[in-house]
Image: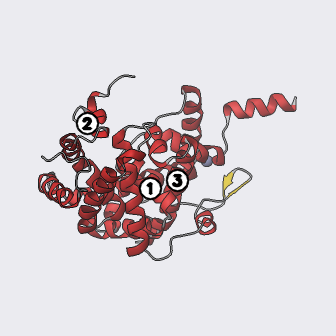
């Protein structure tokens, strides 16, 4: 099994043997990455900071449940994602869309052709930058977790389909399908704001 | 004959629906050469699919633009590392096998 040079500061074996210094070295090397993922997930600075701390604490306390079927750092990120999910559930959102609502935001086809027509977008002309961001976050907030998290991992974190699949414990096919459906739903939600016709 | 026609159509003409099904792979650069050619041939001849692709890409760009990490100075991380370490030191279980450090 080759050692990944990218996580040179993570001495998995020492950590699992209870070496606190080794664990803290991992905290130092992984904090920033973990903070970014969680921030992208919850979009709340304060919450992200304390979730990072909580993630490492949970990881430390549960080291004996690490099974070694993924990298230790991926396992830690998985804990972070779970904590971010439950934070969102408690703190943030209006009811996210169910599968039926999601389906309505997908394009319709008849005899292989789109039933609707589309106007080109010109986001820079139709809304200011801060306004654009607000609209996007509002749309993202409507997505359910399973769609939102593939957007976070694939489009923001720019992780590969394979990594995303491993982190979320789903198949690569599921990652692709969800990503596509999530983007299409966002497209529908944003369309009224950015189609040049509507300006 | 029908099979031949279906096969011919499949090889030379994709429907808009099929093109839609390839969008994620196309944007990801994952289509094989032959399929990519078919995809692009369709896009060149179909304004609806061309506009849809433009919106699909713009959606991805807008999501990236709205990335909360963009609003952050590159290194709040040093302070956060310190906070995290002292948080952990406050919460570690007392060592079970009297190894004092
Ligand atoms: Zn078309």
- Answer yes or no: is residue A92 visible: no
Residue extending farthest right: B1
- Answer yes or no: is residue A112 visible: yes
Instruction: Report the side of B2 relative to A154 (left or right).
Output: right
Q: Toward the viewer: A127 or A50?
A: A50
Where is mark 1, residue-wise? A149
Q: Give yes or no for contact between labels 3 and 1 (Cβ–Cβ under 8 Å).
A: no
Q: Are marks 3 and 1 on the same chain?
A: no
Is the C-beta of the residue carrying label 3 under 8 Å from the nearest atom of ligand 1?
Answer: yes
Is the C-beta of the residue carrying label 1 under 8 Å from the nearest atom of ligand 1?
Answer: no
Among the two numbered marks 1 and 2 on one chain, the one whose residue lies closer to the N terminus: 2
Which percent across, then down, holds residue A19?
23, 40
Dot 2 falls on a residue whose secondary structure is loop
Which percent across, then down, holds residue B94?
22, 56
Residue extending farthest top: A2
Residues under labels 2 and 3: Cα distance?
A: 44 Å
Residues under labels 3 and 1: Cα distance?
A: 23 Å
Q: Toward the viewer: A185 or B95?
A: B95
Q: Give yes or no for contact between labels 1 and 2 (Cβ–Cβ under 8 Å).
A: no
Which percent across, then down, holds residue A121?
42, 60
What chain letter is assigned to the residue under label 3?
A: B
- Position above or below: A75 against B58: above
Where is mark 3, residue-wise? B52
Which percent across, then down, holds residue B66?
31, 60
Q: Give yes or no for contact between labels 2 and 3 (Cβ–Cβ under 8 Å).
A: no
What chain letter is assigned to the residue under label 1?
A: A
């Amino acid at each position: 099994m080759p050692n990944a040079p990218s996580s040179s500061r993570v001495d998995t074996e020492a950590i699992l043997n209870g070496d606190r210094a080794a664990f803290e070295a991992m905290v130092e090397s992984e904090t920033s990455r973990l903070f970014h993922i969680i921030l992208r997930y919850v979009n709340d600075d304060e919450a992200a900071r304390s979730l990072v701390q909580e993630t490492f604490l949970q990881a430390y306390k549960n080291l004996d449940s690490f099974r070694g079927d993924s990298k230790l750092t991926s396992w830690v990120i998985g804990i972070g994602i779970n904590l971010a999910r439950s934070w969102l559930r408690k703190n943030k959102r209006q009811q996210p869309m169910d599968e039926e609502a999601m389906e309505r935001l997908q394009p319709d086809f008849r005899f292989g052709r789109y039933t609707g027509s589309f106007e080109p977008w010109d986001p820079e002309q139709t809304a200011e930058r801060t306004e654009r961001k607000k609209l996007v976050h509002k749309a993202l907030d409507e997505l359910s977790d399973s769609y939102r998290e593939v957007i976070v991992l694939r489009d923001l974190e720019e992780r590969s389909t394979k990594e995303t699949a491993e982190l979320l414990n789903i198949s690569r096919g599921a990652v692709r399908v969800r990503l596509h459906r999530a983007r299409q739903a966002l497209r529908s939600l944003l369309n009224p704001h950015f189609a040049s016709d509507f300006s | 004959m029908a099979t031949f026609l279906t096969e011919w159509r499949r090889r030379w003409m994709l429907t808009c629906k099929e093109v839609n099904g390839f969008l994620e792979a196309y944007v990801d650069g994952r289509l094989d050469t032959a399929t990519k050619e078919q995809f692009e041939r369709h896009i060149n001849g179909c304004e609806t699919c061309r506009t849809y692709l433009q919106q699909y890409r713009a959606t991805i760009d807008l999501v990236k633009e709205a990335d909360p990490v963009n609003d952050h100075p590159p290194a709040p991380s040093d302070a956060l590392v310190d906070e995290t370490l002292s948080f952990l030191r406050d919460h570690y279980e007392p060592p079970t096998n009297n190894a004092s450090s």
